[in-house]
Structure formats: C-alpha cells, structure tokens
Amino acid sequence: MFVTSVNFEDIKEQHEAELAATEEKEQRRQLRSVKALVKQERDRFFELWKADKIARFGTTRKTWKFEDWLKDTGRETDYLSIDTSNSKFNELLNQKPDGFMIDIPESQELRRARQRALKAPRPILAMDFPKSDDTVTFAGLGPFNDEDDEDEDTLVERGDPDNQDDTQFDSLPPFMKSSPPAEVIEVIDPDAPCPRQLPPQLPQPSRPRRRWKTLTETVRVMRANLNNEAGQSHSQIGS
C-alpha cells in the first residue's frame, strides 16, 4: 500500500511557485537584453563626442566637456532619455526581495533590569537579562530516521564476523576513574617587575699545557748527545 503525505494543495502551491520563479527569471533576462541595447546606444554618444573632438581639434586631449558637446550639437534631450532608461533598468535589476522583521514587544522585566543596571557602577556587568517567553517552533524537519532506513545495530550485525573485534566489553568495570586534574598554570602578573637575571656564567678556561718545558728538555738531551759524539770523534782523531 502506497501512502503519500502530499496533498493536492501542496502540489498546487509548489507548481505556482515554480511558475512564478520561471516568470521572474524570464523577466530579468528580457531586462538584461534591453539594458544591453540601451548601453550600446549610450556608448554611441561617447564615440561621437570623441570623433567630433578629433575632427575639430585634431586630438582627444583638448578640453571639451561631454555636457558642452551635447548642448552644442543639440543631443542633450536624446542623451537624457537614454541615461534615464539606463538608470531605470539598473534599479529594476538590482531589486531584492523584501526582508522580514519580527517585532517583539519589550517585557516589563527587561525594562526594570535595564533601569537597575543604569544605576549600577558597571552597567554592563550588572545587566541581568531575564528569560524570554518568545519561542519559535520549526516544523517539517523530521523524522530524521525513516522506517526504510537501516539503523546502526542492523548494520553492525550484518558485518563480517572475521573483522569484528574480540574485545569483551562485559568484562569492563561499570565506571572508570577520570584522569587526574591538570596542573595549575602559574599566572604571571603583568605589573610585577621582572626578576633580576644574572649574566650567563662562562666555563673556567683550562690551564694551558706547558709544552715548552718538554721541548726544552728534548733540546737539552739532543745537545748533550751531540756534544758526546763530537768529543768521541776528536779523541779518536788525536789517538
């Protein structure tokens, strides 16, 4: 059995709304077409103005205002009609649908709360807005779960048993302890003076190695050896 929740009046209203939207779209298309023709005619006046400036002065840089040219050539009335039509088409194409505003009368509690806040040292902090009795009901938003839709439990049951987790949730305790509270961050007062910071301490320089003593001892030994060798050679020569 097929049951529909749309009646004839709803279908009629939807059809009329579609016809109105189509008609408005067609009207705007026609307005844009006519506006394009008006713009072409308006641009033609500027082209004639530049051509007359070149013919009379030999350049377009010569000062000859467009309004003065219209008066001198007698085209002021024609251009005024074209310019008025162009402004009218712009106004029609820039029209937007009228908005709406909900006028809610001010309650006595809100008025008294505002009067009390005005007498307080800090009106903004002392303002206590009472709860509003105006409620708005949004209709036509549900139900979100249709009968034809498959719920989550059905989809889980139809899943592949090999891919399911073997964790037994029944073994878990009925409640679990919450995490420990976060450490309190120290709040630094911006007005407090900065603590005195000592300059960084450099490491103590290491004592230089006294290599010169080792070198001196080595040179002394070498000289002694050379002297001994020289004495031995002289004694051999004398003998």
Image (spheres, rainbow, N blue to C red):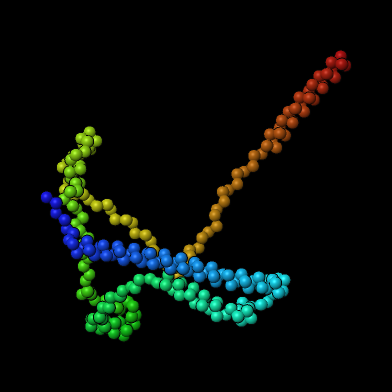
The percent position of residue 87, horizontal first and vertical second, equals: 48, 75
Q: Is residue 205 above or below residue 64?
A: above
Residue located 78% across and 23% down the image: 228
Of the 4 image quadrants, the one containing the C terminus is: top right
Residue appearing at x 37%, y 64% in the figure = 25
Q: Nearer the viewer, residue 4 or 41?
A: 41
Residue 11: image location, x then y, percent: 22, 61
Camera-nearest residue between 55 and 59 = 55
Above-or-below relation of 225 to 109: above
Picture quarter containing residue 123? bottom left
Residue found 58% across the figure and 72% down from its top: 45
- Identified at 31% across, 74% down, the residue is 100
- Report which quarter residue 223 is drawn in: top right
Determine whether, in the image, residue 112 is placed left or right of residue 84.
left
Q: Is residue 229 visible?
A: yes
Mark yes or no: residue 192 visible.
no
Left or right: residue 100 compared with residue 66: left
Q: Where is residue 183 shown, x and y percent of the image?
A: 33, 56
